[in-house]
Amino acid sequence: MRILLVKLNHLGDTLLLTPTTRFLRQQYPEAEIDVLVRAGCEDMLRGNPDITRIIPLARPEKHQRSFGNSLKEFTRTFPKLFLRRYDYAFDLSDSDRAKTWIMLSAAKVRGINNAYESLNWKGRLFNRFSGFKWGSEHQVLRDFRTVTDVIGTEAKAGALRFEPQAKFEELSALFPGLTPETKYAVIHPTSRWAFKQWFPDRWAKVADELHQQHGLTIIFSCGPDAHEKEYVQSILKECRTKHFSSDGRLSLHQFGLLIKGAKIFLGVDTVAMHLSAAVQTPTLALFGPSSEWSWHPWQVRHELVLGDCPCKQTRQFTCDKSKPYPCMGRITEEQVLAKAEKLLQPI
């Protein structure tokens, strides 16, 4: 059996696909399971034993979608898909680009979710449908139920899966004195969306308290973008104790290994939070405008700290997106420390 999953979204969405690939591998141990992803997301699936092949497409930025680049992408990717003669192909990103590749795959069964009847004429490209209403459910289930409904079986979605392809010695070189026996916490305070972030002085107080009260080494992590590194530096300036910073130097797999060894992970709604869930590290997540019912850490011991957000239900946000939303400002250091205390207690 040959199965194609098309997931042309971002890193976090790619990781949320992994309970579905795990189910398929368990259901069809001998199947060839291919995943079509956006370039830059393939590293999230590297080393995943549930997947046969990862096929990256060009990055989504419009300035990289010239006719020449599109032609190169087509000639490179089409033979990989069309000649495979898939038994099943699933559009799990609900984009026109995904639908095009589903059609070109010439799969026998072409599945998609149409619970909200938004496909219109595009539905003709498919011959199997899921009616699962995913709007108030976790996003993991959107992919999972699309696949199980189309296949025609009932199952429960398992945990996320990420297999760090890195060695601890690589981390020790970046953080002097760090060993597998070190008791440490990872704090990931940054997001590409400024309105999801908290405040530097509050993160600093939390970091200092975790170090003083629990003897934890604190490692702040961030991506390589300049604004993220600057944000972490603004936190460190507020700290009374010296802490580590990744300074954007970690690869995705080094980052996953770092989180895996931590006693606790703290952060906002980002891919780092989902990565923490995937490696089964106790996870504390701060949610303001994000829908925690759709994006909370999946199947891992976790605690949420919610900033009251009256706009969340209607999804009508009028606040300034260039800075943390007022709902994030309603979260206090005391709330975060109390939740961290619960996660640090032995089960």
Image: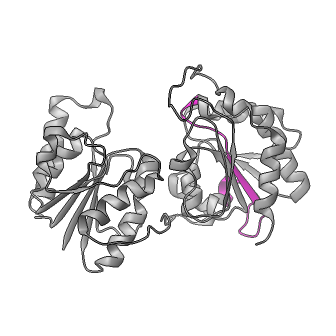
Residue drawn at point x = 43 percent, y = 70 percent: 156
Q: Image height check: is 223 above or below 299?
A: above
Position in image of residue 282 (x %, y %): 68, 61
Q: In which quarter of the image is residue 25?
A: bottom left
Query: In this figure, what is the number of numbered marks?
Result: 0
Q: Nearer the viewer, residue 234 or 177?
A: 234
Q: Which of 246 and 194 is in front in this view?
A: 194
Identify the residue at the far bottom of this view. 29
Position in image of residue 14 (x %, y %): 40, 53
Q: Is residue 199 left or right of residue 341?
A: left
Colour mapping: one colour
Q: Image height check: is 133 above or below 282?
A: above
Residue drawn at point x = 39 percent, y = 72 percent: 155
Residue 46 in sight in this render = no
Residue drawn at point x = 30 percent, y = 72 percent: 153
| Residue range of the region highlighted in magenta in the rendering | 172-194
Q: Give the position of the C terminus as an image quadrant.
A: bottom right
Residue drawn at point x = 42 percent, y = 65 percent: 19
Position in image of residue 343 (x %, y %): 75, 61
Q: Which of 221 and 35 is in front in this view?
A: 35
Q: Does the magenta stretch include residue 28?
A: no
Q: Name the magenta segment's main secondary structure.
A: loop
Q: Give the position of the N terminus as an image quadrant.
A: bottom left
Position in image of residue 29 (x %, y %): 30, 80
Q: Is residue 177 magenta?
A: yes
Residue 236 in sight in this render = yes
Q: In this view, does 342 lie to the left or right of 164?
A: right
